[in-house]
Amino acid sequence: MAVEGVHHHEPNHFTQGQTNHVTVCFAQPDCVWLEELALPQGSTLAEAVQASQFSIQFPDVEWRQTGLGVFGKKLPLHTLVQDQDRIEIYRTLAFEPNESRRRRAAHRARLLHKPKEPRRSRKAKA
């Protein structure tokens, strides 16, 4: 029985393996946005982001400039997606990495040179 508007294809050697299931994600400090997609083989990272309609949800994010990656590795936009890839949209850093390291080092130095409070001696119990 066929349902109107729904096309059923019998699996065969021509159609099997021609779809990659991927997740496009974008992490913000307070939430994570995820979109699961089925894309034809030969799709690129840029095409995956476009298919996810990310730009509609986040029109201010310039993902072409901030970059994309898969499982934590930054890759060119023209990289082909693979089945089960997690495509990550990177965001602009709040601080440059060198500045963040300097700030952490200064914070540790303040903690190390903080004057210690005198220890209280314990009275021996009689």
Image (cartoon, rainbow, N blue to C red):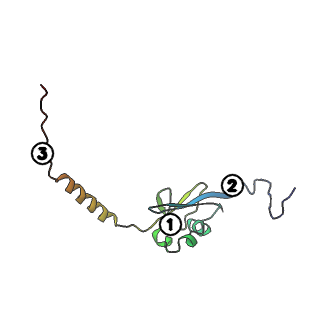
Q: Which quarter of the picture shows residue 124? A: top left
Q: Secondary structure at mark 3?
A: loop
For the residue marked with disc 2, what is the amino acid?
Gly
- Pick whichever of labels 3 and 2 is earlier in the sequence: 2
Residue identifier under label 3: 118
User: Residue reaching furthest top?
Assistant: 126
Residue identifier under label 1: 76
Q: Are marks 3 and 2 in contact (CB under 8 Å)?
A: no
Residue 21 position within the rendered picture, expressed as x and y whole percent measured from the top left? 63, 57
Residue 10 position within the rendered picture, expressed as x and y whole percent measured from the top left? 80, 54
Look at discs 1 and 3 and give the one toward the viewer. Answer: 3
Side of 39 relative to 5 (left or right): left
- Pick whichever of labels 2 and 1 is earlier in the sequence: 2
- Pick whichever of labels 1 and 3 is earlier in the sequence: 1
The Cα–Cα distance between marks 3 and 2, rounded to whole angstroms, is 70 Å
Q: Name the residue rendered at 56%, 70% in the picture.
A: 57
Q: Name the residue rendered at 56%, 65% in the picture.
A: 45
Residue 32 position within the rendered picture, expressed as x and y whole percent measured from the top left? 51, 60
Which image quadrant: the C terminus? Answer: top left
Viewer-closest of 53 and 32 = 32
Q: Secondary structure at mark 1?
A: loop
For the residue marked with disc 1, what is the amino acid?
Pro
Residue identifier under label 2: 17
